[in-house]
Structure formats: structure tokens, C-alpha cells
Image (cartoon, rainbow, N blue to C red):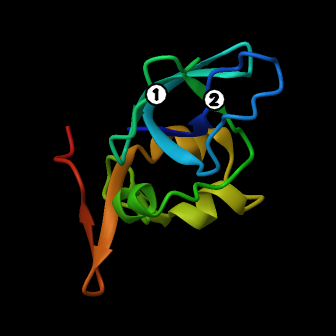
């Protein structure tokens, strides 16, 4: 389960995107096309409106939607049970793409214990 930060793009009727959203949401298993358009489902279940262009990818931005933040993992686990914090995977110089690819089981810290959000496969 991977996340891409994105916000609702609005109508884009005049090219200025004045109707776009202000919250940055977390899209689940999303794909990005041309570094701009994102396709996926928001963790908070927000959806583009009937006349909306869809999702606008916000790579390099942090998620600001309170509902998405509540549902996002705080830690990630690899297939051996090793755990890394979400912050370490995103900001550490030691966190290479190999690490980020290997730590693919989302986890939450609840009561001081780190528990997988999904069953490891």
C-alpha cells in the first residue's frame, strides 16, 4: 500500500485552477501521469466532484487532510518483521529506494506497540 499526496484540482475552466482544494490528501495505490494528474482513492474517501478535473499530484508535499493523517501508517514493516518509522523512510539519507521498496507493510503505533494495518502476505 503506497501513498501519493494529491489535492482536488477543481474545474480548471479558466486555466487558473482557482477552484482547487486546499487540503493535501493521501491517495492509496495511486498512479501519476505526466507529473501532474493522479489517479487513486483518498484515504478519507474524498472524491472529485461531477465537474472536477480530478486529482492533482503534489509530489514533495506533506499530507494535510486530518482524516487522511489519522488513517496513514506511522511505521512500515518489511517481510522479516523489521520496522522503520514513516518519517525515517521519507527523510533519512540512509533510506534508499531499496529500503523504501522493501518496507511495504503499513503499521500503526497503538499503545506503544507497532501493529500491522494489514495482514503480511
Pick out the residue farthest to the bottom: 112
Determine the residue positioned at 38% across, 50% down.
78
User: At which x and y percent is residue 95?
Assistant: 67, 54
Q: Is residue 14 left or right of residue 96?
A: right
Observer-nearest of 43 and 1: 43
**SS type, badge 1:** loop
Position of 67 with respect to 86 (left or right) is left
Give whichever of discs 2 and 1 has the lower sequence position: 2
The answer to the question of whether label 2 and label 1 lie on touching residues, with beta carbons closer than 8 A, is yes
Q: From this viewpoint, which residue is outermost toward the left?
A: 119
Mark 2 falls on what kind of element?
A: loop
- Residue 9 got which mark? 2
The reply, left or right, for residue 97 in relation to residue 107 is right
Q: Which residue is mark 1?
A: 48
- Identify the residue shown where x is 66% and y is 36%: 20
Image quadrant where one finds the N terminus: top left
> Taking 58 as reference, is 87 above or below it?
below
User: For the view shown, which residue lies furthest in the right direction?
Assistant: 16
Q: Is 69 positioned to the left or the right of 117 in the image?
A: right
Distance between the Cα atoms at labels 2 and 1?
8 Å
Q: Position of residue 111 (x, y in %)?
A: 25, 86
Amino acid at each position: 500500500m503506497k501513498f501519493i499526496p494529491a489535492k482536488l484540482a477543481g474545474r480548471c475552466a479558466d486555466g487558473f485552477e482557482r477552484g482547487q482544494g486546499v487540503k493535501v490528501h493521501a491517495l492509496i495505490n495511486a498512479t501519476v501521469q505526466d507529473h501532474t494528474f493522479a489517479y487513486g482513492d483518498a484515504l478519507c474517501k474524498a472524491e472529485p466532484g461531477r465537474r472536477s478535473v480530478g486529482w492533482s499530484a503534489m509530489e514533495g508535499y506533506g499530507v494535510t487532510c486530518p482524516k487522511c493523517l489519522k488513517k496513514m501508517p506511522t511505521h512500515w514493516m518489511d517481510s522479516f518483521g523489521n520496522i522503520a518509522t514513516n518519517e525515517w523512510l521519507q527523510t533519512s539519507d540512509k533510506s534508499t529506494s531499496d529500503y523504501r521498496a522493501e518496507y511495504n507493510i503499513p503499521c500503526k503505533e497503538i499503545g506503544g506497540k507497532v501493529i500491522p494495518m494489514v495482514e503480511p502476505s
